[in-house]
Structure formats: C-alpha cells, structure tokens
Image (spheres, rainbow, N blue to C red):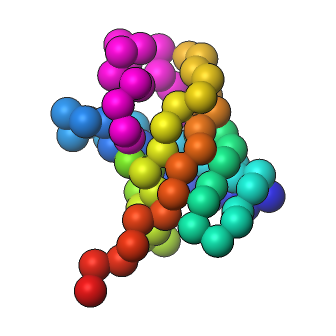
Amino acid sequence: MHTGKGSLVLRNGRRLPLTFQFGSDYDDTRAGHLLCDTSAIDPAALQDRLKVVCDDGTAIVVAVMHSSDRYLAVTGRVLAAAA
C-alpha cells in the first residue's frame, strides 16, 4: 500500500488536507482512499473531476466512487509532468 499526505483540490480551487492510501498502483493508475473531512462540502462538488496534489509533487486526477464525511474512495490517473 502506498500512503502519504497531500491536498484535494476542488473545482473552485478550495484545498482540503488529506492522507491518501492507494491499494493499487499500476503504471499511471491509482485506486484507494483519501482520508479527509468532507462534512462541510456539498456532495455535488465531489462529482466533478478532482485533483490530488501529493506532498512529493505528484498530481493525480481522481473520480470519486464512494464518499462519506471522513473518506473518499477514488480511482484516478497520474497527470503527466509538464515538459
């Protein structure tokens, strides 16, 4: 399991601190859980493409598969680094 810290960037630019736990790490795809407090977020805001920015600089575009007030189950793909 690949774990770390970062932030969830919502479409409006708001950032939520998080801890991530990715159970699958195949090439540039990721699947796992984002542990963060989403209780103050409108659930509709979680239906857009979201971006996770990891503390090591990696950016991942994710789609939410399941949500609660304490975590998001996601699947996504690592964004290519800007050349």
Q: Position of residue 57 (x, y in %)?
A: 42, 70
- Give the magenta range: 35-50
Farthest left residue in view:
12
Q: Position of residue 73 (x, y in %)?
A: 63, 33
Residue 37 in magenta?
yes
The answer to whether residue 75 is above or below residue 36 is below
Residue lying at 51% horizontally and 25% vertically, measured from the top left: 37
Q: Position of residue 60 (x, y in %)?
A: 46, 57
Residue lying at 21% horizontally and 40% vertically, measured from the top left: 13
The answer to whether residue 28 is above or below residue 18 is below
**Residue 54 visible in the shown view:** no
Q: Position of residue 40 (x, y in %)?
A: 39, 14
Residue 70, by quadrant, is top right
Residue 1 in magenta?
no
Q: Which residue is at the front of the view, 32 or 3?
A: 32
Residue lying at 46% horizontally and 68% vertically, measured from the top left: 58
The answer to whether residue 32 is above or below residue 58 is above
The answer to whether residue 42 is above or below residue 21 is above
Residue 3, by quadrant, is bottom right
Residue 68, by quadrant, is top right
**Residue 76 visible in the shown view:** yes
The quadrant of the rendering that contains the N terminus is bottom right
73 horizontally vs 9: left or right: right
The quadrant of the rendering that contains the C terminus is bottom left
Residue lying at 36% horizontally and 15% vertically, measured from the top left: 44
57 horizontally vs 28: left or right: left
